[in-house]
Image: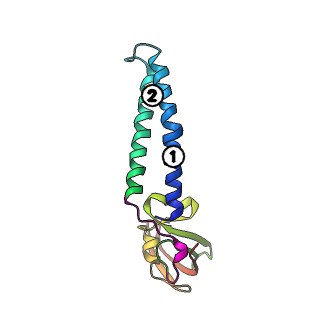
Amino acid sequence: MTRAGQAALDQELKALKTVERPSVIKAIAEARAHGDLSENAEYHAARERQSFVEGRIKEIEAILSRADVIDPTTLSGAIKFGATVTLVDEDTDEEKTYQIVGETEADIEKGLLNIRSPLARALIGKDEGDSVDVRTPGGEKSYEVLSIRYL
């Protein structure tokens, strides 16, 4: 995982523990005050939310406890984990930029490419100017590596 991914998970964990958890506890207490719990929809919704929050806290803590944090700014050379890569689609001349990151921080909409994705696996070890052929669900795609940066 990158330092940015670790920071984002730390921030989410802090919000869950300091904001979400206390608000759920308060909602459960208010719902209990309404009486009969067997037919109390507010109580059941609050308990369900509490279950989600506690589960997410445990999940994030587990991820962080076994994470290997890599600082991409200390890296250079061919494409590897943490690289920010600019590619050009050889068919459409469309340029795309991705950073290769761990599974937990991947978000293709934000340009964060999962290290286990077919494109990332094809890019590993390539240099600027290299061509990459990738088998995607939409068919075979060819890209040229325009630049590699470690931010």
Q: Amino acid at mark 2?
A: Ala
| Image coords of residue 26 (percent x, y) | 50, 27
Vertical placement of residue 140 versus 36, above or below:
below
| Image coords of residue 43 (percent x, y) | 44, 23
Q: Which mark is residue 14?
A: 1
- Look at mark 2 in the image and give the residue it sits on: 45
Vertical placement of residue 22 versus 123, above or below:
above
Question: Tag count in the figure?
Answer: 2
Counting other residues with Cα less than 10 Å from the Cα at mark 1, is it few (<14), some (14-19), or many (20 or more)? few
| Image coords of residue 94 (percent x, y) | 62, 73
In the displayed structure image, the side of residue 63 where residue 27 appears, left or right: right
- Kindly identify the residue that appears in the image at 45 percent across and 28 percent down: 45
140 falls in the magenta region: no
- Kindly identify the residue that appears in the image at 38 percent across and 46 percent down: 58
Q: Which mark is residue 147?
A: none
What segment carries the magenta color?
66-78
